């Protein structure tokens, strides 16, 4: 996507010509879309006016008896400030140069920006009671400005939108949360309200963050590195996608799901893309603050904790760009939900904790808790009125200094009392259980980091928790689940935020005395694969092809007493999972990583990437072991393995790579010796990432083909599996020592 065009030199200055910029340099004074009829200007702060004109042109702005002058610079840009104004209106603003513009029906009041992903974008007409709310939405002194979706490579200077009066005609497709928030403020403050919606569904926080902030934090630079690679590979990826689409269409569009287009230019996930296109153009316009609802797209296991760095960086970057100080930034903590997009591979509790972390460390922020008003099976809960009302309470407290309770109980600290823990809270004048039911949602753990359900009781403004299964509790968690069954709230009915007193990344959460499938470690499957896990030992995950299934039992035996050795399973078959290719592995990786912190991950991918596939088959990816083409080329293999390593590194585990074993002579669909090419590629990637190599290819070369099960069968006999198991156990044991892993 090209957003810049080459401009000729004029008067020794390069003319300002970002495409999409509606300003003209042909003599007439021009204003951005925000400065237009029906706008709301922020009260009590200097008011910036800006635009374009002929270089050197004198521009005058008049408002409420005040006049200011600016002279356009050599690029044709001008700006000036009017003194702060009190709430009121309507008034008229006149802007004069060689031409004159009159901005009519202008109000002065409170201006708020509403941004985020789909739950902030969710329209009023799709919300609970939307039909009735729209019919009653006649509020002449509330004005709405909806920024269209736009992705840009560089910060833009304007948007194509207009201010609209709040009415039954303008509200149906406007943000429901922003509408309810603004209406509540209008009723309580009795001043005009301006609402600027800049939201887009399905987007991550990095796309709303300025490039400077991503570059400034070392841990955030991987977003830029990842996308630089995706852009470089995009042309080839699109060719493959077009081929897959042709096969899919020939197959009648019913055999498989529609092939997914590769990520590349134009994606709403591009780092800084939405900031450049939808936020940067707004930054000259004075606002009181921002409301934000986002996090679902960042709630993967690999990135939920990284949100602790990303979210504050985004927030402070916005404040820097506006240049009006640390304006209030109010955000919604993720609601309760356990449908598509949660479970193994995701960490909604961790993302909520990152939001709470931000609240506690970034000044002038407020957090609205919504774990009581979500929908377990709908990621877009329809009750937006409650969310908007709670955000308005936060604004009244933080932005306007009202003495109003705006938050439910927030965790302060936990203290030990014999066999119980006492939890202290801030942010609420009293505690109660919703609907006078027994308290639910608490769990405690001892130093073994295994959390067991706990009994809880309110004692004044504290909660005391105990568990018969934990004699000496060391940590407590509350509402630590995607869809928590938890009911602590303030005396005014505001829910308590999920909490934890620990900072463990490798804890196990149990439910009802036994771990639920998505909360526990993956098991080995039936038929001798199951084994009890010792919570006092480090957890080792083995990812790989069917060869590695053959030696996993041996590794478990050899490392007994030192580590829990675990392999993913295919749930519907309850058998060990075979990682069939890196490309498929990337799609399933989050499930394979499970729901715990791995101490060591031993991984190998390669044999299935050497498989041949018949290009004449209509079903893309159907294996043909006779003749065809290599399914994963060396170039694609390098791409897949690089992405896999990148994801695994974000788990924080100590990684060990295993070279692909020998391909036996006569193996249908494979060429003996091809594995060396792929091992060489893997060796380069591992060296670049300082990951040690367990060279199983060298080991198997010594006894192949004598130990193959049969001619043309890639698998090994039991004696060979013991040899491989010993090699892998030694590599894992070395990793445990090298990384000084302990539980």
Image (cartoon, rainbow, N blue to C red):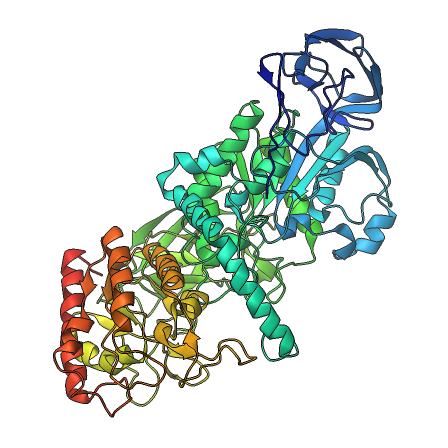
Report x, y in % for residue 419.
29, 60
Q: Residue at x 41, y 43 (%)?
A: 220
The answer to whether 147 is drawn above or below residue 440 in the figure is above
Q: Residue at x 28, y 61 (%)?
A: 682
The answer to whether 104 is drawn above or below residue 238 in the figure is above
**Quadrant of residue 608 in the image?**
bottom left
* Res 21 visible: yes
Report x, y in % for residue 215.
41, 36
Which quarter of the rendered picture does the N terminus lie within? top right
Is residue 228 toward the left or the right of residue 417 in the image?
right
Residue closest to the eye, 581 or 277 = 581
Is residue 303 toward the left or the right of residue 102 in the image?
left
Report x, y in % for residue 486.
52, 61
Is residue 143 toward the left or the right of residue 719 in the image?
right
Report x, y in % for residue 528.
28, 88
Check the image and name the residue furthest to the bottom: 710
Which quarter of the rendered picture does the C terminus lie within? bottom left
The answer to whether 654 is drawn above or below residue 109 in the figure is below
* Res 394 visible: no
Q: Residue at x 77, y 49 (%)?
A: 173
**Quadrant of residue 88 in the image?**
top right
Residue closest to the eye, 155 or 415 = 155
How many labels sit on residues? Answer: 0
């Amino acid at each position: 996507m090209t957003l810049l065009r080459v401009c000729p030199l004029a008067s020794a200055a390069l003319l300002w010509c970002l495409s999409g910029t509606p300003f003209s340099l042909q003599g007439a004074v021009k204003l951005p879309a925000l400065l237009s009829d029906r706008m709301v200007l922020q009260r009590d702060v200097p008011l910036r006016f800006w635009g374009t004109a002929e270089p050197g042109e004198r521009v005058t702005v008049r408002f409420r008896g005040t006049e200011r002058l600016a002279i356009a610079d050599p690029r044709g840009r001008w700006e000036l400030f009017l003194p702060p104004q009190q709430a009121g209106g309507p008034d008229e603003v006149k802007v004069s140069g060689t031409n004159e513009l009159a901005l009519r029906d202008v109000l002065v009041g409170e201006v708020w920006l509403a941004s985020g992903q789909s739950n902030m974008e969710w329209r009023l007409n799709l919300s609970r009671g939307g039909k009735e709310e729209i019919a009653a939405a006649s509020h002449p002194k509330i004005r709405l400005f909806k920024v269209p979706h736009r992705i840009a490579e560089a910060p833009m200077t304007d948007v194509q939108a207009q201010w609209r009066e709040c009415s039954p005609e303008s509200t149906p497709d406007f943000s429901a949360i922003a509408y309810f928030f603004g209406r509540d403020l209008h009723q309580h403050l009795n001043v005009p309200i301006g609402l600027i919606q800049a939201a887009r569904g399905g987007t991550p926080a990095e796309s709303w963050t300025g490039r400077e902030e991503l570059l400034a934090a070392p841990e955030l630079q991987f977003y830029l590195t990842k996308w630089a690679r995706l852009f470089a590979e995009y042309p080839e990826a699109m060719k493959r996608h077009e081929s897959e689409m042709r096969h899919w269409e020939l197959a009648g569009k019913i055999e498989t799901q529609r092939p997914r287009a590769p990520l590349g230019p134009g994606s709403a996930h591009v780092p800084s893309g939405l900031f450049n296109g939808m936020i940067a153009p707004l930054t000259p316009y004075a606002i009181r603050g921002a409301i934000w609802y986002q996090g679902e797209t960042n709630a993967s296991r690999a990135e939920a904790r990284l949100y602790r760095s990303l979210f504050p960086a985004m927030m402070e970057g916005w404040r820097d760009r506006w240049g009006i100080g640390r304006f209030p930034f109010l955000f919604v903590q993720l609601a309760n939900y356990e449908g598509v997009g949660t479970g193994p591979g995701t960490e909604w509790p961790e993302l909520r904790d990152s939001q709470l972390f931000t609240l506690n460390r970034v000044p002038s922020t407020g957090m609205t808790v919504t774990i009581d008003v979500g929908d377990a099976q709908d990621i877009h809960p329809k009750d937006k009125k409650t969310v908007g009302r709670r955000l308005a309470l936060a604004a009244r407290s933080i932005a306007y200094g009202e003495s109003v309770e705006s938050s439910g109980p927030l965790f302060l600290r936990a203290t030990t009392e014999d066999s119980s823990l006492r939890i202290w809270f801030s942010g609420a004048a009293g505690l109660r259980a919703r609907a006078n039911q027994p308290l639910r949602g608490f769990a405690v753990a001892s130093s073994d980091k295994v959390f067991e359900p706990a009994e809880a009781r309110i004692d004044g403004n504290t909660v005391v928790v105990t568990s018969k299964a934990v004699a000496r509790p060391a940590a407590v968690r509350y509402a630590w689940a995607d869809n928590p069954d938890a009911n602590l709230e303030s005396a005014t009915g505001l829910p308590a935020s999920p909490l934890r007193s620990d900072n463990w990344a490798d804890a196990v959460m149990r439910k009802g005395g036994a771990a639920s499938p998505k909360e526990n470690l993956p098991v080995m499957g039936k038929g001798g694969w199951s084994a009890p896990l010792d919570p006092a030992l480090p957890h080792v995950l083995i990812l790989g092809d069917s060869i590695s299934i053959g030696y996993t039992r041996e590794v478990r035996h050899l490392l007994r007493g030192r580590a829990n050795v675990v392999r993913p399973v295919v749930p519907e078959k309850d058998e060990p999972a075979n990682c069939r290719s890196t490309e498929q592995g990337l799609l399933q990786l989050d499930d394979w990583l499970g729901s715990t912190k791995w101490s060591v991950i031993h991984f190998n991918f390669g044999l299935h990437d050497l498989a041949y596939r018949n290009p004449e088959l209509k079903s893309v990816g159907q294996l043909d072991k006779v003749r065809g083409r290599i399914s994963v080329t060396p170039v694609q293999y390098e791409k897949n393995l690089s992405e896999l390593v990148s994801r695994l590194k974000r788990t924080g585990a100590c990684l060990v790579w295993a070279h692909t074993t020998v391909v036996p002579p006569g193996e249908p669909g494979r060429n003996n010796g091809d594995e060396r090419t792929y091992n060489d590629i893997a060796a380069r990637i591992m060296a670049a990432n300082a990951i040690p190599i367990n060279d199983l290819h060298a080991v198997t070369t010594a006894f192949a083909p004598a130990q193959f099960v049969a001619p043309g069968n890639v698998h090994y006999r039991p004696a060979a599996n013991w040899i491989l198991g010993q090699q892998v156990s030694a590599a894992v044991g070395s990793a445990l020592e090298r990384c000084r892993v302990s539980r």
